[in-house]
Amino acid sequence: MSEAKSRFKIKNGEVEIEYEGLVSDVNERYGEALDWLKSIPRREGEKKKAEKTEKKEGEEKKRGTRGPEIWSPAIDSLIQEGFFKSPNNRDNKAVIKALKDKALPVKGKARIILQTLTRKVRRGDLKGTHGPEGWTFWTE
C-alpha cells in the first residue's frame, strides 16, 4: 500500500516555498520553512504592519461610538455655563453649533448628540419638549 502524500505552498512577499511528499516529511519541512521565514529580516514597512497586527491581536478592539464619554461632559459644561438658561430655549442645531465652537467633532453626530440631550431630560438635568419642529431644551 502506498503511504499518504501531502503538500504545502507558502508565499511571503517575493519568497515562495512549495513541497510535496510523504505526510511525515511534509510536516517536518513545513516547520523548518516557517522557522526560516520568521528569521528573514523584513523591510521597515513590513515590520510596522506586523507590529500593528500583533497589537490588534493582543488588544481587544473597542467598538461603538464615543457617546457618553465625549458628549455628556460637553453638554454638562454647556449647562454649567448657562447656555440653556431660560429664556434661551435651544434646539438641537444650536447645541451642535455650540459644541462645534468648542472644537468637538460634530460632523455626522447629530443623532448621538440628540440622544445624549434626551437622556439628560429623562434624568432631570435639562427640561425639554418635542414639538413639530423637533426638540427644544432649556434649564430654569
Image (tube, rainbow, N blue to C red):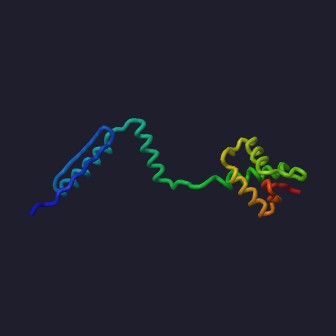
Quarter of the image with the N terminus in it: bottom left
Residue 69 position within the rendered picture, expressed as x and y whole percent measured from the top left: 67, 54
Q: Residue at x 18, y 51 (%)?
A: 20
Q: Which is nearer the eye, 98 or 33?
A: 98
Residue 38 position within the rendered picture, expressed as x and y whole percent measured from the top left: 32, 45
The picture quadrant where one finds residue 64 is bottom right
Tell me: 23 left or right of 112. left
Q: Residue at x 85, y 52 (%)?
A: 89
Tell me: 4 left or right of 130. left
Tell me: 139 left or right of 75. right
Q: Which is nearer the eye, 126 or 108?
A: 108
Q: Residue furthest front?
A: 132
Vertical order, 4 against 93 (above or below): below
Q: Residue furthest left?
A: 1
Q: How many marks can you see?
A: 0
Vertical order, 39 against 114 (above or below): above
Q: Which is nearer the eye, 6 or 97?
A: 97
Q: Residue at x 16, y 60 (%)?
A: 4
Quarter of the image with the C terminus in it: bottom right
Q: Residue at x 28, y 40 (%)?
A: 15
Residue 14 position within the rendered picture, expressed as x and y whole percent measured from the top left: 30, 37
